[in-house]
Image (cartoon, rainbow, N blue to C red):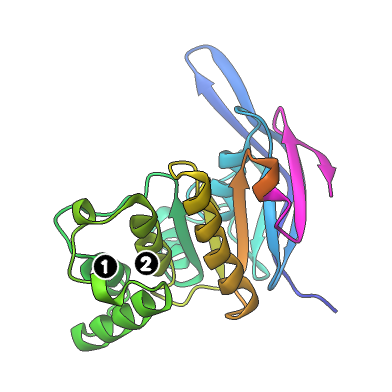
Amino acid sequence: MKKTIITLEDVWKIYVMGHVEVAALQGVSLDVYQGEFVSIMGPSGSGKSTAVNMVGCLDIPTKGRILLDGKDISHLDESDLAQIRGKKIGFIFQQFNLLPTLTALENVSLPMIFQGIPADARAARAEQLLTIVQLKDRMNHRPSELSGGQQQRVAIARSLANDPEVILADEPTGNLDTHTGENVLDFLHELNRKHKKTIVMVTHDPHLAKRADRIILLKDGQVVKKL
């Protein structure tokens, strides 16, 4: 029997903008199973990124419940959410979000500092991860000395720093050309198949979405189709 690692139950997210309420999510319910690769797809403004922010403990719902590995995280305070994020979830963003003054090795090591891992162990783990993404020879380079595809591979390595159960990728190929984007997606597939990571990827690209095990289609803050 497949183990459910993420559950959203009737999740609403309502933002108040002046005197207007905007419902980014309207009663979203979905399950993500351990070890699967799921694409969340939909047009701009459909609630894709908001849904991923919920799963990633970056935000809490206005209504509804979110379970991560069986634990209700819907109403935890920020310090508890930060602990869960650090241990269970790795993030890959469209903008890479690498610190420009740090080398690739230092960028990958950074999440481990907040988990209290000693410096020698951090460096060894970061080198191992950069080897996995084929950047061992670039580990002492800063982001400005790397191509877009290389920077995204550093970001993938960083997302694995604390050996998370779940990797959330929000438009991970959005700033890359088609060929480089395919290579990045190949890395995500390898993490899923070879390293058994659960991956939730947000994309607006049907071609990329089809490479996942399952597609969840959002529109106007609601799940309209599960493929």
Quadrant of the frame with the N terminus: bottom right
Position of 83 compared to 182: left or right? left
Q: Residue at x 29, y 80 (%)?
A: 127
Viewer-nearest of discs 1 and 2: 2
Task: Kindly state the secondary structure of the residue where label 2 is placed.
Answer: helix
* Residue 83 appears anywhere in the view: yes
- Name the residue that disc number 1 marks: 110
Q: Nearer the viewer, residue 135 or 165?
A: 135
Residue pictured at 60% horizontal, 22% vertical: 22
Residue position marked by numbered label 2 in the rendering: 158
- Amino acid at circle 2: Arg
Residue appearing at x 50%, y 65% in the figure: 89
Let me know if residue 217 is in the magenta part: yes
Does label 1 or label 2 sit earlier along the sequence? 1
Q: Is residue 171 magenta?
A: no
Residue at the front extreme of this rendering = 179
Disc 1 packing (10 Å; few <14; some 14–19; many ≥20): some
Where is residue 174? Give x, y as percent.
49, 42
Bounds of the magenta span? 209-227
Q: Nearer the viewer, residue 142 or 83?
A: 142
Q: Disc 1 to disc 2, how far (Cα)?
A: 8 Å
Could you say where residue 160 lies in the image, as x and y percent from the top left?
44, 72
Q: Quadrant of residue 98?
A: bottom left
The kind of residue tagged 1 is Leu
Confirm or deny contact between disc 1 and disc 2 (CB under 8 A): yes
Drawn side of residue 79 relative to residue 210, left or right: left
Residue 115, compared with residue 27, is above or below; it is below
Please indicate, yes or no, whether residue 64 appears anywhere in the rendered image: no
Please, what secondary structure does the residue beneath circle 1 have?
helix
